Image (tube, helix red, strand yellow):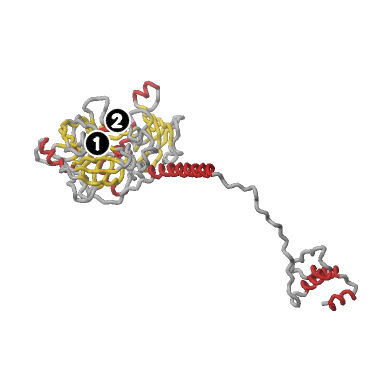
Amino acid sequence: MDEFLNSKENNGESPETVITETQTEETQDEALPQQSEEQPAELETEAVTETAIPDEEPFVYNPVQYSTVNPVEDYKPMSKGLKVFALLMALVILLTGSCITGYFIGKNSVKTLGGGKVSVNLSSRPKDTDELTEAQVYEKVNKSIVGIVIYNSEGLGSQASGIVYSDSGYIITNDHIYSEVPSAKFKIYAYDGKEYDAEYVAGDVISDLAVLKIAPNKLEPAEFGNSDEIFHGEHVVAVGRPSDATDNSSITRGIISAVSRRVQNTSSYSARLIQTDSAINPGSSGGALVNMYGQVIGVTSSKLASVEYDAVGYAIPTTTMKRIADELISKGRVETRAKLGITYTAIDSVTAEINGYDYVGLYIASVSEDSDLYGKAEEGDVITHINGIAVTSDEVVLDIIEQSAAGDKITVTIVTEDGKTKTVEAVLKANVSESSYTTESAQNKLPGNSGGNGSGSGNGGIFDFPEGE
């Protein structure tokens, strides 16, 4: 090594020159860090030389520079009170998040037992057969009427009636019966006093129908008649459990006052129902309106009983019941019901004459973005015809939509604000509703889900097809 350095010195090159040339020629190696001033020049020269000729000498490691870390002497641990406060705050945040999450899960994610199959036919009125007496009708239908006790672990409860729909264990009742009982459970009481546990299958707010289920082949299903065959003045009886769901069913007699009256059955929906003067009292909801051949022709509801008039009650026709119940059982919800998706004000002939309107029909107040009329009709337009039928009242349009299914096409004749007439085609959208059934706790449950007693014809006002106001 000395010989190598001496040869360089003999050529007139200083050690510093050697370092510079080494850094330039060895481009793949990084420059060595500078040495301390106390280091001898011989050591520095030796380090540079070893870098220039790595194969001849072992690599020399530079000393590690570090600073001494002294512990913090004034550190004080968190006080016990502060720890408790932090723990309480964490619990409050966790509890709040759980309540919010539970509310939405309970309200919007109720599991149903949809997916079942059932085959129930509506029987025609018997021909050349005498009507039964009230006692005979009661004897025939009583085995198919049940009492329902609705309860939960928080102590809330109510009572209602039900009709055995099929031998597979399905029971028809009203959707509103559990609206004030979150996470409801159900006990079924049969005609012979036997008790059964029932499961919630599905429900529908719009039709006020619901389905429960017990074990198959436990109870005898009712015979259901075709409600399209009923007539004004026909004698009927109502059978249910108005006083005590665990007691025997009672029977009241009356007539059919109206075969198809449009009634506002919720705060935002109207439907055609059977009107009767048979007494339908609290607890009778979900019971049966029966003709004098022992055929169930309607599902009674005390919620729909008129509070403005005496001896006015309503029942959901079996034609509506079958369509809704079969879909609740098979799909867990109603998916085929149709809607047009507008809000409107009805203009009849009297309204038109009083206000000086040129047209009779439906004044469009708004068109929802999910409606097929969006972009085809605007606020201020008037619908004068649906499928070529003159719109003399909103009932004309409601009837057409209720007889249609989601995906059906209708033609709509519109008069615009500037007086021009046009006819457009619109595809009806699905009107899928929720049930009153919820798994949220009673403390988080919002008020007003049960609604009040429905009444009125559904005429006038602003309605959302076909949901109403």
Give residue 43's quadrant in the image. bottom right
Q: Is residue 458 above or below residue 39?
A: above
Residue found at the far top of this picture: 354
Give residue 105's quadrant in the image. top left
Residue 48 drawn at (x, y percent):
79, 70
Residue 136 drawn at (x, y percent):
10, 38
Q: Looking at the image, how many numbered discs can be counted on the residues?
A: 2
Residue 467 drawn at (x, y percent):
35, 36
| Front residue of this view, candidates 378 and 250 | 250
- In the rendered image, which residue does mark 1 sit on? 285
Q: What's the residue type where badge 1 is placed?
A: Ser
Is residue 155 visible in the rendered image? The answer is yes
The residues bearing labels 1 and 2 have C-alpha atoms spaced at a distance of 12 Å
Label 2: few (<14), some (14–19) or many (≥20) C-alpha neighbours in 10 Å: some
Give residue 64's quadrant in the image. bottom right
Q: Is residue 1 left or right of residue 188?
A: right
Position of the N terminus, as image quadrant, is bottom right
Q: What's the residue type where badge 2 is placed?
A: Asn
Is residue 397 visible in the rendered image? The answer is no
Residue 268 drawn at (x, y percent):
35, 33
Residue occupying the point 23% across, 50% down:
215
Position of the C terminus, as image quadrant, is top left
Q: Dot 2: what SS?
A: loop
- In the rendered image, which residue does mark 2 sit on? 453
| Front residue of this view, candidates 116 and 4 | 4
